[in-house]
Image: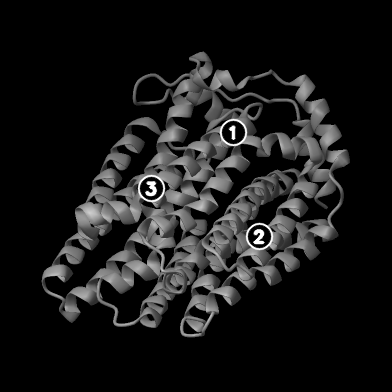
Amino acid sequence: MGSILVLTTIASTLGGLVFGYELGIISGALSQLQTRFSLGCVQQESLVSALLIGSLSACLIGGWMIDRHGRRTSILLGNLLILGGSVILTTSTTLFALVIGRAVIGFAMSISSMSCCIFVSELVNPERRGLMVSLYEVGITFGILLAYGVNFILANVSGGWRYMFGFAIILCLMQLGSIWFLPQQDFVNSHLEIIEESNVKYSILDLFRTKNNMHRRTTIGIGLVLSQQFTGQPNVLFYASTILFSVGFQSRASAVLASVGLGIVKVVATLLAMVCSDRVGRRSLLIGGCTVLAVGLMVTGFFCGESVIDASKSCRSVEPHSNLSSLAEDQNSVNKMTWLVLSEIFPKDVRGRAYSFINCFNVGANLIVTFSFLSIIDVVGLAGIFLVYGVVGLFAAVFIYHMLPETKGKSLERIDRELAQTRGDIPLQVTTEFTRPPDPKEAFSQRIAV
């Protein structure tokens, strides 16, 4: 394995680690911030959602920024912004400063994650791309676990939330060190411009047209990201400690400790997903994952309702286990498989723009779900909202069953041909194979990924 590939592996994993840490750290910090700043429901939602507002703005302009200034430069910029945002959060004395810091970090996280994925895909050969994507996912889940661990250690420390936010600086410096030694992307970008000139041109409007069933592919992509958001999964991540405390854990520290268990399950489930994705198949994992997730959410809703009436230990102990199973299936199938499928169903000439476009729906839906979570609980209760999430999960399983073909073991060209000829619920199985000329982009990747 060449030095470039080693550095790329380290940079990708550290990028996921930073991403996951920033996602999970608010869960424990929010409990202390609520007391320190006397935050109400709307104020807590604003603080949590600020990350998503920044991320959404990055989705709108990130593609242009990455293409204009290069992948490596964009990753470095993203890390510097995370450093700046972490400093703002660590030194904040007002809610406004906290919101600004979270928004800056959200913008930086989105830019860094998109450019990191593109950078890795261009530097490694095709045989290793799947592994690199999986390593990024593993980095995210380990980052979430690390965040939950830090939350627990600092749960009873006065002003611990400042250290929670400040610890991200160390992770950013580690990733910056790995990125710094990677080669500049100028020669890669110039090569990609040559490839782009020889390819069929697509516009963003082609995503809504019937040509090659692009509108169906767009529907599949939007449906997948909306399904993972409207089952409430980000709320269980962001508000984990708050939820666990509200259903019977006797202290904030015990609730934070229980959330560490959620992080451990997510790590184990991600490792299982790495093994199963190419054996079981994307479609099967998505259908099964949504179904089990729906059942887990409904069980959670049932015991949340029971705990309000009868706050017995049995009710309080079953509810966290139900959350664990829901999160495990979420990470094992829905989240990981969604982004894997999105990288497969679009033609390579429009894949980047399609990814960015659908990610806008993903972040927008995440923003809506997160911002409204505590307010909806005030209306329908914790039990009611989990039951609604469970019903959405069942509808998602039906949607995937009817709309998504299996992509396991198929080349991107074959997937493209089958989706282009899909009619109704069953894709036509195109079995005619042909020898295509070598892809210059793949040949270029193989030359530099020694």
Counting labels gives 3
Q: Nearer the viewer, mark 3 or mark 2?
A: 2
Mark 3 to mark 1 CA distance (whole Å): 33 Å
Residue in view at x 41 percent, y 76 percent: 256
Q: Quadrant of residue 10?
A: bottom right
Give x and y (percent) for residue 293: 31, 54
Q: Secondary structure at mark 2?
A: helix
1 and 2 marks in contact (CB < 8 Å): no
Residue in view at x 34 percent, y 53 percent: 373
- The foreground one among 365 and 434 is 365
Which of the marked residues, 3 or 2, is nearer the chain's N terminus?
2
Residue in view at x 55 percent, y 68 percent: 142
- Please give the label number shown on residue 156: none
Mark 1 to mark 2 CA distance (whole Å): 39 Å
How is this picture coloured? one colour
3 and 2 marks in contact (CB < 8 Å): no
- The foreground one among 288 and 34 is 34
- Please give the label number shown on residue 412: 1
Query: Does 353 appear above or below 70?
Result: above
- What amino acid type should be assigned to the residue bearing mark 3? Val
Question: Could one spot residue 140 in this view of the protein?
Answer: yes
3 and 1 marks in contact (CB < 8 Å): no
Residue at which label 3 appears:
369
Question: Could one spot residue 408 in this view of the protein?
Answer: no
Pointer 2 local density, CA inside 10 Å: few below 14, some 14–19, many at least 20? many
